[in-house]
Image (cartoon, rainbow, N blue to C red):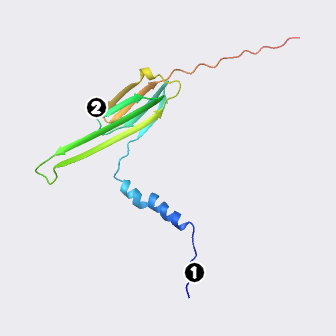
Amino acid sequence: MSSLVRWDPFAELSALQKQFFGDDLMSSLKGLSIPTTDVYTKNNDLIIEAHLPNFDQKDVNIEVDNNALVISAERHEKEEDKAKKYVVRESSSSFYRRIALPERADPDNIKAHLDSGILKVTVPLTPLPEPKKISISSKKS
């Protein structure tokens, strides 16, 4: 006589969830450094700070495309050493962010500066118009 096993419809989903979000995935990502990007406004400027350690100015490209700021960086290193067991060792890193610009952005006056691995892009914003005050009149009889 065979025994019946209760079927759990969520067991497979739970196994997939552990596979994608469990400790195994997180332990493999602990050594991985994901660059951060901060976007904020200050004094009628939109400021974008991208943390790009180990990137030089020549590695970084900034452009405005279809009302969005596109920051990309790519570094490729190639080392040849006949004395070691490998002949060629190559490594590469890349970074890509696309940030939608607000309508009041002034793309012709964007400034960028890279210092100590932090790229700071300043996008000037046209000031918001002051609210128009409406005077109130009274009806006299």
Q: Secondary structure at mark 1?
A: loop
Quarter of the figure with the N terminus: bottom right
Identified at 15% across, 50% down, the residue is 87
Label 2 Cα crowd, 10 Å radius (few <14 / some 14-19 / many 20+): few
Quarter of the figure with the C terminus: top right
First-in-chain label (2 vs 1): 1
Identified at 23% across, 46% down, the residue is 90
Q: In the image, is residue 6 above or below residue 24?
A: below
Residue of label 2: 58
> Is residue 7 toward the left or the right of residue 52 in the image?
right
Residue 42 location (% of width, % of height) = 48, 28
Of residues 73 and 111, which is closer to you in this image? 73
Residue 53 location (% of width, % of height) = 31, 39
> Is residue 5 toward the left or the right of residue 84 in the image?
right
Measured Cα–Cα span from mark 2 to mark 1? 67 Å
Q: Quadrant of residue 96?
A: top left
Identified at 86% across, 11% down, the residue is 140
Query: Number of numbered discs present?
Result: 2
Q: Secondary structure at mark 2?
A: helix
Label 1 Cα crowd, 10 Å radius (few <14 / some 14-19 / many 20+): few
Residue type, label 1: Leu
Q: Residue furthest right?
A: 141
Residue of label 1: 4
> Is residue 114 toward the left or the right of residue 8 in the image?
left
Residue type, label 2: Lys
